[in-house]
């Protein structure tokens, strides 16, 4: 029993997906591998970022100590080594250092946040790419399924036409065979009738010939008898004539 067009679409969609899945799976795997590589590289970059900013903090603290030592030496040369002015100056140097450290930490946080954003964006891009691949595969499977179903319908239609044509040919052929048989029977009957008529004609002709021969023979006998009678009469007349002399 032939399936409906909707059933054909369902069947051919499964066929199309089985054909498309290998390439689709390869592309998804490639995206996964790319995401994993990118995530690993970005995650590893955090180590370098932290090391870099740790170094900057260390250097800044070293610079602060150096600056304070220079300031302390200057204050001592001025005779104000432990005065309130000197202590205020040293405190201000620490405040400046703290601001530098805070800026470095802020930059570190920004750099790390940028990495995290890049990792998040990589996942977003991965999901979007996988979704696009899925949509493309769905469209391709739908197109292929309709193409396959249309071809199947055309094949079934052609097969139906061929079946009808074969049936019509068989019907026509059987009719021709039957007609030929009838014609042969009619010819045989006509031939038999003609033969019978020919034989009857021959028999009639033979009978007519026999009748004609019989009549001829009878007439010959009559004629022969008449000749004999005439001859006898002539002989008797001749005898009488001689006797009278």
Image (tube, rainbow, N blue to C red):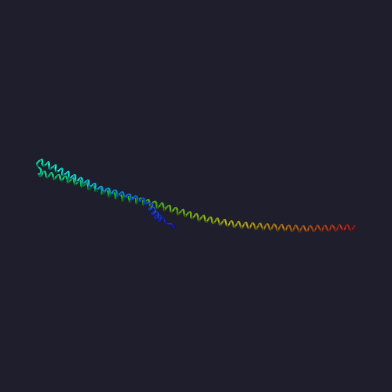
Left or right, 129 with respect to 148, comes to left
Query: Where does residue 148 sit, x and y in percent of width and height?
Result: 41, 52
Q: Nearer the viewer, residue 131 or 97?
A: 97
Left or right, 2 with respect to 188, comes to left
Query: Where does residue 138 sit, x and y in percent of width and height?
Result: 36, 52
Query: Where does residue 35 sit, x and y in percent of width and height?
Result: 30, 49
Left or right, 115 with respect to 6, comes to left
Quadrant in which the N terminus appears: bottom left
Left or right, 150 with respect to 34, comes to right
Q: Nearer the viewer, residue 49 or 5?
A: 49
Query: Where does residue 243 sit, x and y in percent of width and height?
Result: 89, 58
Quadrant in which the C terminus appears: bottom right
Q: Nearer the viewer, residue 154 or 133?
A: 133
Q: Is residue 233 above or below residue 129?
A: below
Q: Nearer the viewer, residue 89 or 36?
A: 36
Report the number of discs.
0
Residue furthest to the right in view is: 245
């Amino acid at each position: 029993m032939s399936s409906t067009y909707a059933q054909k679409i369902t069947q051919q969609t499964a066929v199309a997906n089985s054909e498309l899945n290998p390439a689709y799976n390869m592309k998804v795997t490639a995206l996964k591998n790319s995401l994993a590589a990118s995530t690993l590289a970005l995650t590893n970059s955090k180590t370098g970022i932290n090391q870099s900013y740790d170094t900057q903090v260390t250097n800044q603290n070293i610079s602060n100590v150096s600056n304070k030592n220079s300031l302390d030496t200057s204050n001592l040369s001025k005779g104000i080594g432990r005065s309130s002015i000197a202590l205020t100056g040293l405190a201000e140097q620490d405040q400046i250092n703290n601001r530098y450290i805070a800026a470095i930490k802020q930059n570190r946080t920004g750099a790390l946040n940028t990495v995290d954003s890049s990792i998040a964006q990589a996942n977003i891009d991965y999901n979007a790419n996988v979704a696009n691949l899925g949509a493309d595969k769905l469209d391709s499977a739908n197109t292929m399924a309709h193409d396959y179903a249309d071809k199947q319908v055309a094949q079934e239609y052609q097969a139906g036409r061929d079946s009808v044509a074969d049936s019509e040919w068989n019907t026509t052929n059987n009719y021709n065979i039957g007609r030929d048989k009838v014609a042969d029977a009619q010819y045989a009957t006509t031939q038999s009738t003609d033969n019978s008529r020919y034989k009857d004609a021959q028999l009639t002709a033979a009978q007519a010939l026999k009748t004609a021969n019989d009549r001829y023979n009878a007439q010959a006998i009559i004629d022969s008898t008449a000749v004999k009678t005439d001859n006898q009469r002539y002989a008797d007349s001749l005898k009488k004539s001689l006797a009278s002399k």
